[in-house]
């Protein structure tokens, strides 16, 4: 099976990591080989005594990072990924984002 077939069939896995200075994404196949990656530089801010990011920074950063990954897949394989076998997110950033059950931000 080709890498393109794996992408089309969703036999791929997407990982996104929100780091302190860069958001990174990687797409791997079912044999753990890297298919493509993407990233977006960003910076935290020191506000009211805390290191943090705005929700706009988070949403826009993830979107830009994913777009970079998707464009890299398109450039290499001629298609955009549309489905995945699984996805994971890691957020090891300095900021603290606490949400309630309705995804409302609880702390600034």
Image (tube, rainbow, N blue to C red):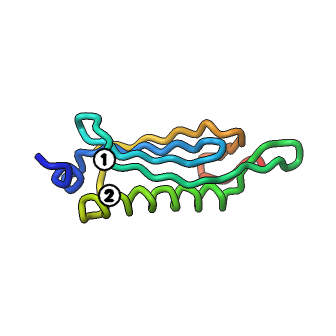
Q: Work out which residue is located at the far front of the displayed protein and give it.
A: 76
Q: Is residue 71 above or below residue 90?
A: below
**In the displayed structure image, the side of residue 34 where residue 56 appears, left or right:** right
Q: Give the x, y percent position of residue 76.
A: 28, 58
What numbered label is drawn on residue 55? none
Q: Residue at x 78, y 43 (%)?
A: 51
Q: Give the x, y percent position of residue 78.
A: 24, 65
Label 2 crowd bin: few (<14), some (14–19), many (20+), radius 10 Å: many
Q: Is residue 30 above or below residue 41?
A: above
Q: Work out which residue is located at the far left of the displayed protein and give it.
A: 1
78 or 63: which is nearer to us?
A: 78
Label 1 crowd bin: few (<14), some (14–19), many (20+), radius 10 Å: some
31 or 98: which is nearer to us?
A: 31
Q: Residue at x 66, y 42 (%)?
A: 20
Q: Give the x, y percent position of residue 5.
A: 16, 53
Q: Secondary structure at mark 2?
A: helix
Q: Are marks 2 and 1 in contact (CB under 8 Å)?
A: yes
Reading the image, the residue beneath label 1 is 35
What numbered label is drawn on residue 73? 2
Q: Work out which residue is located at the far right of the displayed protein and give it.
A: 48
Q: How many marks?
A: 2
Q: Residue at x 82, y 42 (%)?
A: 50
Q: Residue at x 51, y 52 (%)?
A: 39
> Of label 2 and label 1, which has the lower sequence position?
1
41 or 97: which is nearer to us?
A: 41
Label 2 – label 1 distance at C-alpha = 7 Å
Q: Secondary structure at mark 1?
A: strand
């Amino acid at each position: 099976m080709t890498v393109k077939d794996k992408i089309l069939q969703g036999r791929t896995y997407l990982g996104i990591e929100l780091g302190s200075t860069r958001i990174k994404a990687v797409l791997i196949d079912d044999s753990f080989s890297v298919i493509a990656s993407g990233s977006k530089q960003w910076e935290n801010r020191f506000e009211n005594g805390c290191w943090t990011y705005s929700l706009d920074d988070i949403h826009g950063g993830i979107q830009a990072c994913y777009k970079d990954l998707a464009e890299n897949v398109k450039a290499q394989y001629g298609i955009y990924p549309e489905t995945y076998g699984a996805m994971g997110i890691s957020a090891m950033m300095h900021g603290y984002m606490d949400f309630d059950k309705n995804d409302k931000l609880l702390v600034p």
